[in-house]
Image (cartoon, rainbow, N blue to C red):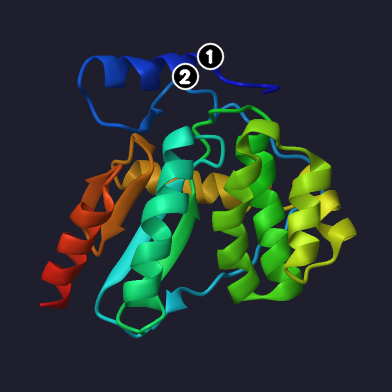
Amino acid sequence: MKGFSRRALLASAGALSAGGLAGCLGGSGGGGDEHECSGEQRSVEVPPAGDPESDVTVTAYEDFACPHCRRYAEDTAPEIKADYVETGEIAYVHRDLPIPMDETWSWAVPNASLAVFEDAGADPYYTFVEEVYQFQDEYSADNVAGLGAELGADEEAVRTAIESGPFCEQVKESKAEAEQRGVSGTPTVFVNDTQLEAPSTDELREEIESALG
């Protein structure tokens, strides 16, 4: 994968070999702080999925190039959304945290996702941030923008977002928010203010049930 961050990969692998958390590790020196935004910038406000008025909010910080985030998106998130989001019991929020595991796609995919939201709305956006992981081993402008088009967004708008990064500053703000909350790796999931690092489906479900009372 082009632009892959060897330092981030080694940190992740080291945590696993040491019996640590099964996540992609970031922190200072990961390369994200030096990422420069260019061109005209804009931002969009993505609403939570589920019930925005719920007393329980689940916030997931992900790097689209992190293999552990892919596992979370493919295995855990769909079950949680089926059980709690689609039933209107919780609010669910996706946040971008480019460690970056990949110097190009850790930033480009968030820009693409926000272009999908801007052009097609919240439901396609939340579908996109799960389904785009299928291309993790072979990200390209064609397959990422093509997915956006399948979900109802203008393919050229998504492709332009990949190439020019018009939401780069917004993604950096999301990264800064994560760091302020003490997040050092992905996926990290909050249930209200309770932080779970690379949680299993059962761990996340247990915390949600506790919060729901």
Query: Furthest residue to the right?
Result: 156
The N terminus lies in quadrant: top right
The answer to whether residue 70 is left or right of residue 162 is left
Q: Nearer the viewer, residue 151 or 189?
A: 151
| SS at mark 2 in the image | helix
What type is the residue that disc 1 sits on? Answer: Arg
Residue at which label 1 appears: 6
Q: Residue at x 34, y 85 (%)?
A: 53
Q: CA distance from mark 1 to mark 2?
A: 5 Å
Q: Amino acid at mark 2?
A: Leu
Tell me if residue 175 comes above or below residue 138 in the rendering.
Answer: below
- Residue at position x 43%, y 62% in the image: 78
C-beta proximity under 8 Å, tags 1 and 2: yes
Say above or below: 188 vs 92. above
Residue 130 shows in the view: yes
Q: Position of residue 62 (x, y in %)?
A: 46, 46
Identify which residue, 45 or 23, lies in the foreground. Answer: 23
Q: Is residue 194 visible?
A: no
Q: Nearer the viewer, residue 77 or 37?
A: 77
The residue where tag 2 is placed is 9
The image shows residue 136 at horizontal and vertical percentages of 61, 37
**Coordinates of residue 98 in the picture (x, y in percent):** 53, 38
Q: Residue at x 66, y 75 (%)?
A: 121
Q: Is residue 211 left or right of residue 159?
A: left
Who is closer to the viewer here, 37 or 145? 145
